Amino acid sequence: MRKNNKFSPLFWPIQLKGNSIYILDETLLPHKVKYIKATNYQEACQAIKEMKTRAVGQVILVLYTFLLVVKQNKNSKNLSLILNKVAKAINATRPTLSFKFLTDMVLGWHKAKKPLDKSIIGFLEMLKASRMEQARKASKLVKDKDVILTHCNVSGSLPLLAEFAGKEGKKVSFFVTETRPYLQGARLTAWELKEAGFKVTIISDNMVAQVMKEKKISKVIVGSDNLAQNGDIANKIGTYQIAILAKHFKIPFYVLCPPASGARTGKDIKIEVRPDKELLTYQGLSLAPKGVKGYYPAFDVTDKDLITKHIYLEV
Amino acid sequence: MRKNNKFSPLFWPIQLKGNSIYILDETLLPHKVKYIKATNYQEACQAIKEMKTRAVGQVILVLYTFLLVVKQNKNSKNLSLILNKVAKAINATRPTLSFKFLTDMVLGWHKAKKPLDKSIIGFLEMLKASRMEQARKASKLVKDKDVILTHCNVSGSLPLLAEFAGKEGKKVSFFVTETRPYLQGARLTAWELKEAGFKVTIISDNMVAQVMKEKKISKVIVGSDNLAQNGDIANKIGTYQIAILAKHFKIPFYVLCPPASGARTGKDIKIEVRPDKELLTYQGLSLAPKGVKGYYPAFDVTDKDLITKHIYLEV
């Protein structure tokens, strides 16, 4: 059972206290739990650039950054100019303008003369409540003694799911793929589940079929980075083949989804190919012969037909 | 094309010169190409224990060890006693008595009063010729411009296959899974293919479905550690799920087989579960949170129905 009643730090990895934003440095996990302090928007943007936080942490950080700027410029006549500058800096942190929909949303509130602080706080409260509700809905799908296989990290949703299940007397445990090359499964998911007091076993990404064949897995639950309008999803590389294997072994495959994106189907989602250096080295150690190339698609698309059930985020 | 006309060092990783056996230290590859010298059976057994060589290298090493002992005790009246002692030492290097069939074979030759040196040399020549013939047969299955996905390491057979194909004007290239946790794909297969002048791209084990979906792969060719009498095979963990994925994407899946073992079907093959420490650390670095367990089945069984064609070793 869970040791304590607090959220996984990964569920809400960013805090705003006074005039400082505290950002959980996920790159140091699980060996160190350290928060980076940002006291202005430039420092916050730097943390995004250096990928100190990811997934929902980035969304929260963008909104707290605006909240901090609003606090710091309460009486400024130039608030509009300042907000535009901040939005531009945030948009520039990623080549793909991943945050434009968020910065546009905040600028839109300002344009519509809505009180920004209340709008941002309201949005974040709604986000938190929706994510809790999503984990609660997912907990309804599991049975007592279920062993859930997951991949990568779903930002604190799985410990919460297991806690909701526990409240209904259903004890669940987990297998997690290490999730090469960044090892988010081993570093983040195994860590948050262990910290929360749940049983978790790490396997490497090539052991999925074997543990399924051994009947060690009763359900697969993964997150997703992008939900297309037709129900296809994009998630961390490796998700797709787990879905195919789950179908082969007739194991239910559930997906915790974000709000639907503009993509009509998975075909509209461009797969980011990252530098092969990230695949071929680990903490400065070379894993491969000099001069050999790697190929590193960072995400893959899972067709809706492979998904037993989508667990939507209702916002 | 191949840079030079010699075998991959992994095809025949052990040499006997005078009274010394030279053992390619595969644990140092690809960063260092170093041979360990053994001048007696104890040193040879130590190299097996420390897993300096693997797969076919172990078979060759066992036979060269007997050949060395025969050389060193040519005029001894106690040769039978000595051979029995050596066989016992070799059998004791592995808890599963993996080499008993080899040591029994040599002791059998001696009992039948066959000249041991000629018998051993003859056996090794036959083994080399059979393995070359196996690679040649496999080369007949590939077409010009084929991209072959492989897993783990097939001890020099793939560069040879590609060379045979090249002689018939068929140019092939390779993708290789890194093969966690030991990274034999990245360390050994990528190395031997690159050294031989063939194009090879490394992916992590969770990218297989994605590269198949992108139509980057035209054939899968893997080795096997154990061939059951019904055609099921056991090979390095991860082989099984690649076979399932190949079937899903309708990609031919070929297996280079050893001689059939005593196993009737794959169910008779016991899967070795190794210490999770080997999965959860890399070169002394911890990959996972303290106290979290891993599960490390080192091999898996691929059902014969998933295999498009077995390429047998005719001995």
Image (cartoon, coloured by chain):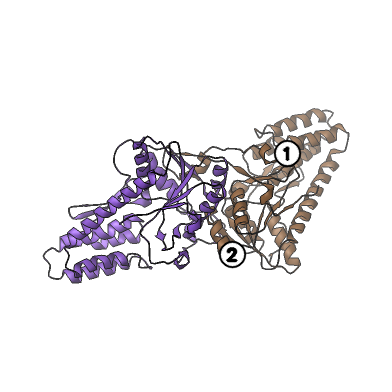
Chain colours: A purple, B brown
**Local crowd at mark 1 within 10 Å, few (<14), some, or many (≥20)?**
some
Left or right: where B148 falls relative to B112: left
Q: Residue furthest right?
A: B113
The percent position of residue A105, horizontal first and vertical second, equals 26, 66
State if disc 2 and disc 1 touch (CB < 8 Å): no
**Three-letter amino acid code at disc 1?**
Arg
Viewer-nearest residue: B315 or A277: B315
Viewer-nearest residue: B269 or A167: A167
Name which residue lies at 45% across and 66% down: A270
| Chain letter, disc 2 residue | B
Per the image, the residue denoted by label 1 is B264
**Three-letter amino acid code at disc 2?**
Lys
Residue B14 in view (yes/no): yes
The percent position of residue B210, horizontal first and vertical second, equals 53, 60
Q: Find residue B112 and name its label.
A: none
Element under disc 1: loop
Viewer-nearest residue: B66 or A234: A234
Q: What distance separates the C-alpha of mark 1 from that of mark 2?
A: 36 Å
| Chain letter, disc 1 residue | B
Element under disc 2: loop
Q: How many marks?
A: 2
